[in-house]
Image (spheres, rainbow, N blue to C red):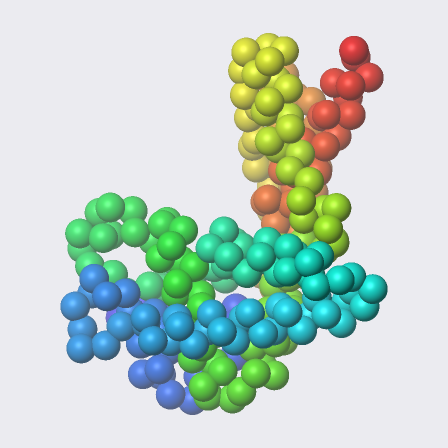
Amino acid sequence: MVNLAKLESRLNYTFNNSDLLIEALTHKSFKKPYNNERLEFLGDAVLNLIVGEYLYKKFPKSDEGALSKMRASLVNEKSFMEFAHLIDLGNYIFISTAEENNKGREKPSLLSNAFEAIMGAIYLEVGIKKVKEIIHDLLDESYEQIDLSTLFKDYKTALQELTQAKYGVTPEYKLVRSFGPDHKKEFEIVVYINSKEFAKAKGKSKKSAQQKAAKITLDILSKEE
């Protein structure tokens, strides 16, 4: 049996009912009398509410349309997969051998669903306050800044389009190092074009560091023109 204490430590929450945690981690392929689909359903509703409230309070002057766009960019499979990576959730999911061989632990949908289920399970045990604490911490860890301009600016895509047009190649991102305690880890990324180093940046997540490095590289390339 996998040691779930490490996962609980990363969440900063210890389950009173270990069976509930196991259910939240059990994919339907594992062929048990239970799986995490019902908890996923609950977790999805809880996360929509928490992120909606977070944005409502953070942006008092934003209208419903802007708030909806921001929530959609944060409450989705990609975002929840990032959160799952931050707590190493893939290491703890119970899946079938066939799913394991099919790289199930890396599948965005499987990771996202398990993350929702975990949040649903915590909500059932102790209510929304603890889930809110966890989500606020993960948002702080994943995003340097949350607003319309940063959420919808994709510097990586812009850089890729530019380098493909200009050089016929795509940028390469390499992790130089990660540092800091598990609950506050930072990452340093270098971006290369044609094996040449262009920029280096740090962030609270690999995604954040990559976006920063891409932006710096775009600035450098624009000055060369």
Relative vertical location of residue 98 with respect to residue 50 in this rendering, above or below: above
Q: Quadrant of residue 181?
A: bottom right
In this picture, residue 189 sits left or right of residue 121: right
Relative vertical location of residue 158 with respect to residue 61 in this rendering, above or below: above
The residue closer to the viewer here, 199 or 67, is 67
Residue 11 percent location from the top left of the image: 53, 72
Residue 125 percent location from the top left of the image: 46, 88
In this picture, residue 24 sits left or right of residue 168: left
Q: Quadrant of residue 36?
A: bottom left
Residue 40 percent location from the top left of the image: 39, 71
Task: Judge whether residue 167 can be spotted in this image.
Answer: yes
In this picture, residue 5 sits left or right of residue 172: left
Which residue corresponds to the image point at 64% horizontal and 19% vertical from the top-left? Answer: 162
Task: Judge whether residue 203 can be spotted in this image.
Answer: no
Q: Give the position of the N terminus as an image quadrant.
A: bottom left
The residue closer to the viewer here, 63 or 176, is 63
Relative vertical location of residue 217 with respect to residue 101 in this rendering, above or below: above
Residue 207 percent location from the top left of the image: 59, 44
